[in-house]
Amino acid sequence: MNPLDIMLWGVLPYLVALVLVAGTIWRYRYDQFGWTTRSSQLYESRLLRIASPMFHYGLFVVLVGHLMGLLIPKSWTDLVVSQETYHAVALGAGTVAGIATLAGIALLIYRRRTTGPVFLATTRNDKLMYVVLVAAIVLGMLATLTGDHTPTGEHHNYRETVSIWFRSLLILQPDVEAMAASTWQFKVHVLMGFALIVLMPFSRLVHAFTVPLHYLFRPYIVYRSRDEVPAAASHTRVRGWDPVGTRDRERGKR
């Protein structure tokens, strides 16, 4: 077995996972105030309203597609749909989601580059993050569109190579040969994915670990006016609403 393959597909994945976990714990313990996306909505919101949902929703579909393709064995889906149908659906949905994600991040970069205050708030870390993120997306689309054939012309199905290798990592028995048999497009895409994962704890991407899901379940916030209640209406009580006052206001009436 090639020593380089052993290093790339048998050792490197666990080193990346170690950096991700240790880096995230370190960031949470020593840089909680920096655990933020550093929102720039205050400086510009028109493009942000378009680009941000396009990028995030597209990326969500891409991630769901990755998890389904990597975690669900091919033998399971073959019981429900044919390989041709599965490939057509995955290719169509993946291409649309990839284009939406790429267009969204392109708009975000354009906004950041052309809006003065936003550009001034951009760090070197942000620039590196954008380069790696865009590269991972582009390489993923390249693998999806061109990685189904080997250089010799043989058909390649990533679910028989990359997926088997990925699942083997979860049980701590890396199938290096399975990943080594994949096409170069998928190999480069995986390596760029490793670079993105390593960068996550040390960039604004760390906010992905703190998605505010509790917003979906918290009660509504009711805002009540603190204006003076007119004398004619002071004795009229509306059901469900009580007048709001303060001690200072009560003293001022005396």
Image (cartoon, grey):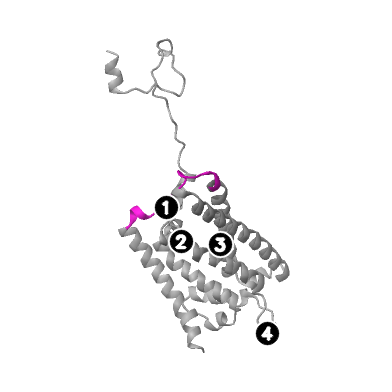
Per the image, the residue denoted by label 1 is 120
* Residue at the farthest bottom position: 1
Left or right: 93 with respect to 177? Answer: right
Comparing 159 with 230, the one in front is: 230
Comparing 27 with 139, the one in front is: 139
Residue 26: percent from left, percent from top? 33, 63
Query: Which disc number belongs to residue 63?
Result: 3
Comparing 109 with 170, the one in front is: 109
Three-letter residue code for mark 2: Lys
Residue 4: percent from left, percent from top? 48, 85
Per the image, the residue denoted by label 4 is 152
Three-letter residue code for mark 3: Leu
Q: Residue at x 56, y 65 (%)?
A: 137
Q: Residue at x 43, y 68 (%)?
A: 198
Cα–Cα span, label 1 and label 3: 31 Å
Mark 4 vs mark 2: in front: 2
Exactly how many numbered labels are in the figure?
Answer: 4
Cα–Cα span, label 3 and label 2: 22 Å
Instruction: Give the magenta range.
Output: 31-47
Three-letter residue code for mark 4: Thr
Q: Considering only order in the chain, which callout, 4 or 1, is on the residue closer to the N terminus?
A: 1
Mark 1 vs mark 2: in front: 1
Task: Confirm whether residue 80 shows in the render.
Answer: no
Q: Are marks 1 and 4 in contact (CB under 8 Å)?
A: no
Query: Which disc number belongs to residue 127?
Result: 2
Mark 1 vs mark 3: in front: 1
